[in-house]
Amino acid sequence: MGRKSRVLVRVVTWPLAPALLAGQFVVHQRAGGRLLTGPADVLYLVAMLVCWTVGVLLTWRVVDQPAGWAFLGLGTTLTWSGFTDQYAAYALGPGHAAYGPLIATFSDSSFVWWFLFLALGLQFTPAVRPTSRVLPVLTVASGLVFQVASLVRSTHLERPYAEIVSPWAIGGIAGPIAALAAVSVIVLGLCLLASVYVLVAGFRRAQGEARKQLLWLVAGATPLAPCVVVAFTASYAGFDAAAGWVLSVCVISLALGAALSVAKYRLYDVERIVTDSAAYAISTGAVVAAFAVVVVVLTKSLPVRADSQLLTILATLAAIGVARPAYMWARRVVDRHFNRRRFDAVQLVRAGLAQSPDLEALLVEATGDAHLRALFPADDGWVTSDGRVAVPGPHLIDVRRLGEVSARIEFDPAYCDRVVVEAVVHEASAEIDNLGLRAELAKQVEQITESRARLAGAHLEERRRMERDLHDGAQQRILAIALQLRSARVNGGDTVLRAEVDRAITDLALTVQELRDLAGGLQPAALAGGGLRAATDELAGRIPVRMKLDVVDQRFAASVESAAWFVIAEAISNVVKHAGVEEVAIQVSADRSQLRVAVLDDGVGGVDPHGRGLQGLADRVAALGGVLSACDRPGGGTRVEAVLPCG
């Protein structure tokens, strides 16, 4: 619902009860009586005012909260019931006003709207709001059916209008209409009792703060069940006044229970409405007082006429100057008296933020909760302000920026009320965002440190492997060739020497191949000479699977080409070892700022992104400011992709 729609709905609905109350006053004035003639009228007026006030408060801010409209509807229907009673008595008496029988018919059936809005108010309480629409729909339907049946039935009304028949009555079907009315009102009464049961059951299931929120409302709603039964019984027995007393007490009890739940435990989240209203009221009074003081002082001390335009301008400027300070002062006063604990915490945070303190320490000091900590979103979870990985607990308050959760404040409700934590978090939200940026930086520093440590370890391990391979392989083979040739020279003889030379040539060819294989694990010569296109073409001729190449023919920085080559080589090695496929695709593309390398296969999948080989590649790519990802493809197989900056 848009802002204009909300304003329009409030403008239409809020004044209904005051207008009907004013109508009662007018009727009483014409009839020559008084508006309040006894305790019953006072009790009825109190019930109406309490329900209407609670409804206005609930719908002020939370316009989409059905419970608020239910309370507003209850207050309005109470006023409607009183208005129809008074108007019917006046119109059918000496006043002889128009529409007397019709208004009497509405008066005779107005109690049904009490039951309907009472039931809806309980059903749509936020903590127990039903997931099924059956009960609310049945409640509204039974109420509407009874109202329509009351207007069209041809039987006489109840006392004191026993001689009146509805002017809209339809003859010939009096029996079925009366039966329909009786069934619908019984169903509505059962819906009201079911609403009380739903509320009590929700209270029994609730825990912690939700249970506290419902405490006063349940206490206020508990008398409803027996009172409804008593009211029905009294009404059918002819004691309508007693039934009205009983229902008025029920309504006041429920409305006061909702008001106490709002005031103590923010049941409908309107505490801010109450404090804002009080602050605006006080500041408005200060503005009016300032305007009046200026007018009085100037008219008494200076020769200025009361209707002077200069006087109006000066008084208006004074009022404008007083408005903001008066509101801030009133807000502090109201907050201090409404929730002193929250007020002190907010003031402490406000003073601490001006001194650029340790934010988390400040929040801990303000709330008194040593377990409080700020958590910030990371790639796969949450981190603390110093960049360490953390798992959020059950009690959290979200901090939002541009519609997204930018941080979460974890707290322990055993040490601090949620209301206090929400208030200090709201006060420090901007600084929390800055802390989140620092946490992100700390996380990146931690990742870089870990990456460097892994790279250093990998380089050391690679160097040891190369030394071992050279020592155990090529070096031993070359030494053996040298010994063979020396032995042939000592022994002499052309035949022996020729045989040893042939053997040495064979061993040297094997040694050259072994050195090539060893060098191939570092970087091929084709990469330095022709780039990635030439290196992948050369690789395609040496591996035992077909390669489908889509490689850009372009040169890049040596470090970028080297990292891209190692990604391709490691991915191809994994395909040959584990994928069990006959074809692999290599895709290399580039734009102005990024080089994208992807190796795809249709094998068995099951890639481990944190495996030793891929983790080493990720560190190598990250060292250049790039990102490596490895995942299973939806249709089967694996995709290894690296994005490297090349601009």
Image (cartoon, rainbow, N blue to C red):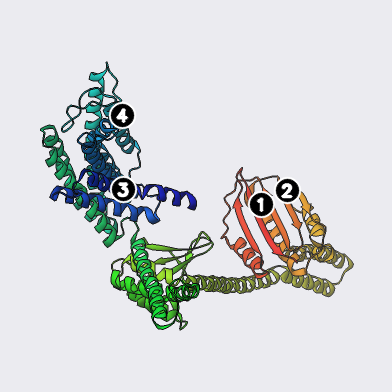
Q: Nearer the viewer, mark 4 or mark 3?
A: 3
Q: Is there CB contact under 8 Å for labels 1 and 2? A: yes
Q: CA distance from mark 1 to mark 4?
A: 77 Å
Which residue in the protein does label 2 denote? 545
Q: CA distance from mark 2 to mark 4?
A: 82 Å
Mark 4: amino acid: Val
**Left or right, 258 with reference to 313:** left
Q: CA distance from mark 4 to mark 3?
A: 23 Å
Q: CA distance from mark 1 to mark 2?
A: 9 Å
Which residue in the protein does label 1 denote? 575
**Left or right, 344 with reference to 550:** left
Residue that appears at 26% across and 62% down: 264
Dot label at residue 644? none
Q: Secondary structure at mark 3?
A: helix
For marks 2 and 4, the one nearer the N-term is 4
Mark 3: amino acid: Ala
